[in-house]
């Protein structure tokens, strides 16, 4: 077995004789077990983030802010792997917007730089700045934001006016509050900042934005309250999703009660994340536009890791295994075994494509951590950086073609995978 380079990653290139034939019901059970473990890890790391946020608000300082940022980054590792469970599972898709909605118009939440602009024809909430304003009037509607509560964030602000850019909950609202805007664009990092490329180029909100006694940015207590409520909601939302995958949970039942439906869910998730969502909307679109606003984790400059762990999550699903944050491994019957029983050559092709994309993602991650950040990599005129990103896109598209062949080999019918104009109709992007 060839070991991959990252210690937290499971090897996926297996000897072709290692498996006996398996039944679909065993494969979907392993899938549900992987899902449960992934969401449990997402929950435990979110609780660690919650504790770090509490510490920051109790004692605002550079050290507690950095610890909260580190906890946020750690929390992204297991969660991003669970995104391979989207698209095929309605319970997950209907819930996902609460925790990972993106992109967001940050001027709805807090102060922004003048370069952000003062209005948007597409969003009446573009710069209402809830943290600074207890009473709002938006589009003729009165909004009472006196108390920053879970109800305000979830039921009033989240997707207000039906606009998906109005994001008040989830990882990215928390990310913005911890880092502030990233105003560096695709240019160099400020000369006075130290650390890794990511640390030097990301947003640079001061810890005093949370310190009522030495307040910068104004409204420090309300800002801290917004951060606290959003983090508590994230924990509650992940608790709910863990429940859905436990022994009698609705999401587990949906895939295990009908194994064919479970296989369809698995491959819909793999193909849609691989192609339309990740290769298209999250990567190719930003590369075509050379636009750092299209980064997935834009405030923290963590996008390279976000993409990397999405790929690892797809590998987890195909191989029926997941390495938990405590180092233990959840493993069961796999799609790989099921495909091999039908067509050993196709399984070898699928695993080779997953490996190739993983290696391209590793190269992108390594480049971002040692040379330049992801937003710099997609800059216009950066031929080397663009090529590193394009290699990841090419790998994702190629593995999607193999996923489509797996769907056909397993006789699962006409599964509709997510598309993207950036891949399917690139001219439309510029219209």
Image (cartoon, rainbow, N blue to C red):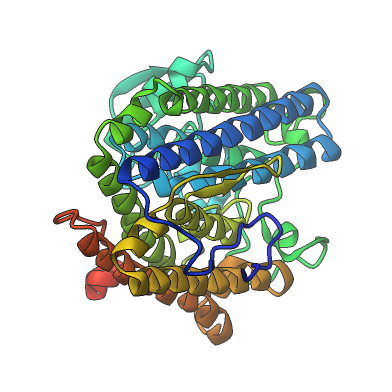
Q: Quadrant of residue 374?
A: bottom right
Percent of width and height locating residue 82: 48, 44
- The residue shown at (48%, 36%) is 33
- The residue shown at (29%, 41%) is 262
- The residue shown at (59%, 51%) is 299
How many marks can you see? 0
Percent of width and height locating residue 64: 81, 35
In the displayed orientation, state which residue is furthest to the left.
414
Question: Which of 362 and 333 lies nearest the eye of the viewer?
Answer: 333
Please state if 73 lies on the left or on the right of 207 as rendered. Answer: left
Does residue 359 sit above or below 119 in this rendering? below
- The residue shown at (38%, 22%) is 156
Judge whether residue 287 can be spotted in this image.
no
Does residue 137 sit above or below 431 in this rendering? above
Judge whether residue 98 can be spotted in this image.
yes
Question: Which of 221 and 198 lies nearest the eye of the viewer?
Answer: 198
Question: Which of 325 and 182 lies nearest the eye of the viewer?
Answer: 325
Percent of width and height locating residue 8: 68, 54
Q: Quadrant of residue 200?
A: bottom right
Quarter in which the C terminus is drawn: bottom left
Percent of width and height locating residue 206: 75, 42
Quarter in which the N terminus is drawn: bottom right
Q: Quadrant of residue 111?
A: top right
């Amino acid at each position: 077995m060839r070991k991959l380079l990252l210690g937290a990653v499971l090897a996926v290139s297996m000897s072709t004789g290692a498996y006996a034939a398996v039944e679909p019901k065993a494969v979907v059970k392993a899938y549900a077990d992987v899902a449960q473990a992934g969401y449990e890890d997402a929950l435990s790391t979110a609780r660690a983030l919650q504790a770090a946020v509490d510490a920051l608000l109790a004692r605002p300082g550079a050290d507690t802010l950095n610890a909260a940022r580190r906890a946020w980054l750690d929390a992204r590792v297991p969660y991003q792997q669970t995104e391979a469970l989207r698209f095929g599972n309605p319970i997950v898709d209907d819930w996902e917007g609460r925790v990972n909605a993106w992109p967001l118009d940050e001027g709805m939440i807090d102060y922004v730089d003048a370069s952000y602009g003062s209005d948007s024809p597409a969003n009446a909430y573009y710069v209402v700045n809830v943290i600074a304003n207890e009473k709002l009037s938006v589009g003729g509607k009165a909004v009472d934001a006196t108390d920053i509560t879970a109800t305000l964030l979830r039921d009033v602000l989240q997707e207000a006016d039906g606009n998906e850019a109005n994001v008040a909950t989830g990882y990215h609202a928390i990310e913005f509050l911890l880092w502030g805007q990233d105003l560096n664009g695709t240019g160099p990092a400020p000369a006075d900042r130290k650390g890794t490329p990511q640390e030097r180029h990301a947003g640079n909100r001061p810890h005093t934005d949370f310190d009522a006694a030495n307040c910068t940015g104004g409204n420090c207590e309300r800002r801290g309250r917004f951060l606290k409520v959003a983090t508590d909601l994230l924990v509650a939302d992940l608790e709910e999703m863990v429940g859905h995958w436990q022994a009698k949970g609705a999401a587990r039942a949906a895939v295990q009660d009908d194994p064919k439906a479970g296989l369809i869910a698995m491959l819909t998730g793999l193909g849609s994340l691989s192609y339309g969502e990740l290769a298209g909307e999250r990567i190719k679109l930003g590369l075509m536009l050379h636009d750092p606003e299209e980064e997935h984790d834009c405030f923290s400059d963590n996008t390279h890791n976000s993409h990397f762990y999405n790929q690892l999550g797809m590998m987890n699903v195909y191989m029926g295994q997941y390495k938990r944050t405590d180092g233990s491994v959840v493993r069961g019957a796999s799609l790989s075994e099921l495909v091999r029983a039908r067509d050993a050559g196709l399984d070898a092709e699928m695993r080779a494509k997953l490996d190739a994309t993983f290696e391209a993602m590793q190269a992108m991650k390594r480049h971002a951590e040692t040379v330049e950040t992801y937003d710099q990599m997609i800059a216009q005129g950066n031929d080397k950086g663009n090529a590193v990103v394009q290699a990841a896109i090419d790998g994702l598209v190629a593995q999607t073609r193999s996923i489509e062949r797996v769907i056909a080999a397993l006789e699962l019918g006409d599964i509709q995978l997510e598309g993207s104009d950036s891949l399917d109709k690139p001219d439309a992007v510029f219209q």
